[in-house]
């Protein structure tokens, strides 16, 4: 039992699970689940009680039972007590103060990451302002490599997302080349396929591989199909770069995705066996999103932001190249409006980074949410300032296959201009080599006769 007083009223929270939920900034998913604070006053009282909670408490009280949940077992069994030692004496509130201090350098945060469990990260985020989340995340540096280097200070990468509602190769190739001409694609060229057929998936893998090899592009491709489909594609000899899977923060939500931790290990081993990386061997790409556990009825009464942070422990286990919180995709049932989406995006990015995960964000919303592109501009700017590893690049910011709104090829140009962000160094050097960028990394005017465009015309024909 936790008791907190606010304005002369005593607020009681039965256990740590309830305290965490009631301390969470308001969002529609927690209201839907029946775990949200009933008033702003109760929310403040819960934050005050949470701030006084020792961080060690999260090592002794599991929010999701250890005996029945493999994600909890993974979190507890992998905890690094030595890495945790420098902050082990702190309360949640003291941890916040330390994160914002000069003592919490990039090097210190890197050493600390294995010592944090997701619930600690989630707890401290709940008592942080948006600016706190930006400042603390900016100091976290998580660098990963496959054919280029992602996450270096002062750099931001972009995933080209050339989706097509019928997996038409001509449409996909046109969007891919459009993105490359705008200097996007250093994170990954990643397709959400309309089909899960292994043959169709393999055709897309081969097509992207041909573009990457022909033009010697220092990037990687990924087809965002189920991990078992990718494993089968590897078995059939497909030139797979990255293995994708959607993941969640409980065993139940991963069951709903049809995936186990053993499958993820098998997928990683399959990709590693191909030895296709040139500068590193981070071969996994994961996507997450607040609310997935509630959708699967696998939330155990835990608030959605804490469960999202637990998903990052799953990701961390498999040393991914990229982790992407698709922040507004699940819909207004979980994040109702632009304010909630912005807050969730900043929380997810901070929690992932402080846990040592290479976080990107699909800055997005569905058309029935109370949000618009101005809200996305705010989140884009704040995540850019926070040092986000990568964002999405989608033609016109409108995904014609998944039917949602995200960020465009043009948006990344704006953010680079305003914040001075460069691309992955190997990719930037390639842009200069092939004449798409000058020696300062600025794009040259589009060339009607550039070989990339000529290749696209041949595919279209």
Image (spheres, rainbow, N blue to C red):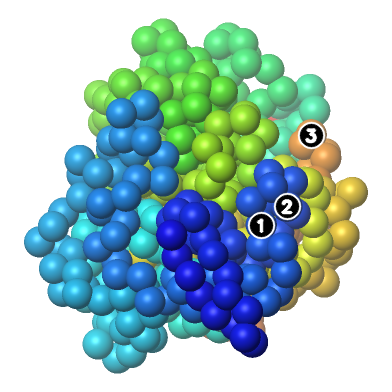
Q: Which residue is mark 3?
A: 401
* 162 relative to 313 in the view: left or right: right
Nearer the observer: mark 3 or 1; the answer is 1
Residue 5: image quadrant is bottom right
Which quadrant of the figure contains the C terminus?
Answer: top right
How many angstroms separate mark 3 from mark 1 (CA)? 34 Å
Label 1 belongs to which residue? 36
Relative to 137, say whether 436 is above or below.
above
Q: Is residue 270 above or below residue 293?
A: above
Q: Nearer the viewer, residue 35 or 290?
A: 35
Q: Tag 1 or tag 2, which sits nearer the N-term?
A: 2
First-in-chain label (3 vs 1): 1
Where, quadrant-wise, is the N terminus in this rendering? bottom left
Disc 3 to disc 2: CB gap under 8 Å: no
The answer to whether marks 2 and 1 mark residues whose Cβ atoms lie closer than 8 Å is yes
As drawn, the residue found furthest toward the bottom would be 102
Q: Can you see residue 418?
A: yes
SS state under label 1: loop
Residue 66 place in picture, x, y as percent: 31, 35
Q: Residue at x 58, y 18 (%)?
A: 201
Residue 31 tag number: 2
Q: CA distance from mark 3 to mark 2?
A: 30 Å
**Marks 3 and 2, the one that precedes in the sequence:** 2
Contact (CB < 8 A) between labels 3 and 1? no
**Could you say which is closer to the camera, residue 32 or residue 319?**
32
Residue 384: x and y in percent read 56, 74
Task: Report x, y in % for residue 67.
Answer: 31, 28
Question: Is any part of residue 188 visible from this angle?
Answer: no
């Amino acid at each position: 039992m936790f008791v907190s007083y606010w304005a002369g009223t005593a607020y009681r929270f039965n256990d740590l699970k309830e305290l965490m939920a009631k301390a969470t900034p308001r969002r529609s998913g927690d209201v839907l689940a029946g775990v949200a604070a009933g008033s702003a006053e109760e929310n403040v009282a819960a934050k005050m009680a949470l701030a006084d909670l020792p961080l060690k408490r999260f090592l002794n009280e599991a929010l999701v039972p250890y005996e029945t949940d493999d994600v909890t077992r993974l979190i507890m069994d992998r905890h690094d007590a030595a890495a945790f030692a420098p902050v082990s004496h702190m309360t949640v509130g003291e941890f916040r103060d330390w994160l914002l201090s000069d003592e919490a350098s990039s090097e210190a945060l890197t050493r600390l990451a294995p010592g944090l469990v997701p619930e600690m990260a989630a707890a401290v985020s709940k008592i942080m302002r948006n600016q706190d989340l930006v400042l603390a995340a900016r100091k976290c540096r998580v660098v990963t490599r496959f054919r280029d280097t992602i996450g270096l200070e002062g750099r931001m990468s972009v995933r080209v997302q050339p989706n097509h509602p019928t997996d038409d190769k001509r449409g996909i190739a046109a969007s891919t080349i459009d993105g490359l001409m705008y200097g996007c694609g250093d994170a990954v060229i990643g397709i959400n396929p309309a089909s899960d057929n292994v043959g169709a998936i393999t055709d897309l893998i081969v097509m992207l591989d041909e573009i990457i090899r022909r033009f010697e592009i220092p990037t990687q491709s990924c087809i965002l199909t189920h991990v078992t489909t990718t494993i089968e594609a590897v078995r059939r000899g497909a030139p797979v770069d990255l293995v994708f899977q959607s993941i969640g923060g409980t065993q139940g939500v991963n069951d709903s995705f049809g995936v186990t931790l053993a499958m993820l290990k098998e997928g990683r081993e399959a990709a590693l066996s191909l030895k296709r990386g040139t500068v590193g061997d981070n071969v996994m790409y994961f996507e997450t999103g607040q609310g997935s556990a509630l959708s699967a009825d696998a939330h155990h009464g835990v608030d959605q932001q804490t469960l999202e942070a637990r998903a990052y422990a799953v990701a961390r286990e498999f040393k991914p190249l990229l982790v992407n919180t698709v922040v507004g995709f699940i819909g207004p049932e979980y994040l109702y409006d632009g304010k909630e989406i912005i807050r969730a995006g900043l929380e997810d990015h901070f929690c992932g980074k402080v846990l040592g995960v290479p976080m990107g964000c699909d800055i997005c919303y569905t058309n029935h949410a109370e949000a618009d592109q101005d809200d996305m501009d705010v989140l884009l700017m704040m995540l850019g300032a926070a040092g986000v590893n990568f964002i999405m690049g989608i033609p016109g910011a409108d995904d014609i296959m998944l039917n949602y709104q995200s960020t465009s090829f043009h948006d990344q140009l704006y953010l680079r201009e305003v914040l001075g962000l460069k691309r992955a160094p190997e990719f930037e050097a390639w842009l200069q080599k092939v004449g798409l960028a000058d020696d300062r990394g600025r794009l040259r005017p589009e060339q009607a006769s550039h070989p990339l465009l000529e290749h696209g015309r041949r595919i279209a024909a």
